[in-house]
Image (tube, grey):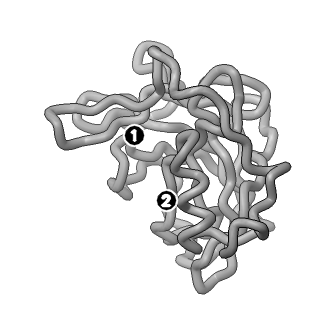
Amino acid sequence: MPKQDVDVNQVRISAPPPDDSALIQVDDVFIVVTQAFCPNGHNLIVDFENSEYDFECDFDGFPGLKLRLESETEAGDVVLSPFHGDSSKKGKTNWAKGTKLKVCCPQCKTPLPRLASCRCPDKGDLVKVYLSPNLTDSHVLALCNVWGCQRSHTIDNWEIISEYLDGQIDD
């Protein structure tokens, strides 16, 4: 995608990630999401102590990322692994592969905002999970809303430009 085709209203560049970044590096190998927020500022990381779920919500000792998924006929909560590149999930995981879902905050039920089209065969959309309590577009986790699509992106203030320019996400 040529630079002139980048939607500058959607792509914002801000300061470098804050000291309390939502991403940490573990053992010089793993990247772990440690904080995540819906558009209304609700924390999407599972609280071990106060978890209302009847299933384990941790992944190797780290709390997962909780989301509400809705299809035309049913809804349920899922907890995603906080490890970048790990597709492990817990909770409601019996969706048919290729099902396009509405991804929402489990607390306020607000749908997560769309970032861009996904390049998956099922023509999904990448939705934004904010990685900063400031709810800035320059620090987001982009997840595809099609069940089974493994395309997700962790985007900081410079990577979002490379994702668009490399053609990894559309519009």
Q: Nearer the viewer, residue 151 or 138?
A: 138
Q: Is residue 63 left or right of residue 163?
A: left
Residue 113: numbered disc: none
Where is residue 48, by image quadrant? top left
Q: In the displayed orientation, state which residue is furthest to the bottom.
A: 121
In what element is the residue under mark 2? loop
User: Residue 113 at what x, y percent from top left?
Assistant: 78, 48
Q: Amino acid at mark 2?
A: Thr
Q: Identify which residue is drawn at 54% across, 70% down.
A: 166
Q: Is residue 13 left or right of residue 94?
A: right
Marks 1 and 2, the one that precedes in the sequence: 1
User: Residue 12 at what x, y percent from top left?
Assistant: 73, 42
Q: Identify which residue is drawn at 54% across, 59% down.
A: 162
Image vertical order of residue 2 relative to residue 138, above or below? below
Which image quarter holds the N terminus? Answer: bottom right
The residue tagged 2 is: 93
Q: Is residue 94 left or right of residue 30?
A: right
The residue tagged 1 is: 82
Where is residue 130, by image quadrant? top right
Which image quarter holds the C terminus? Answer: bottom right
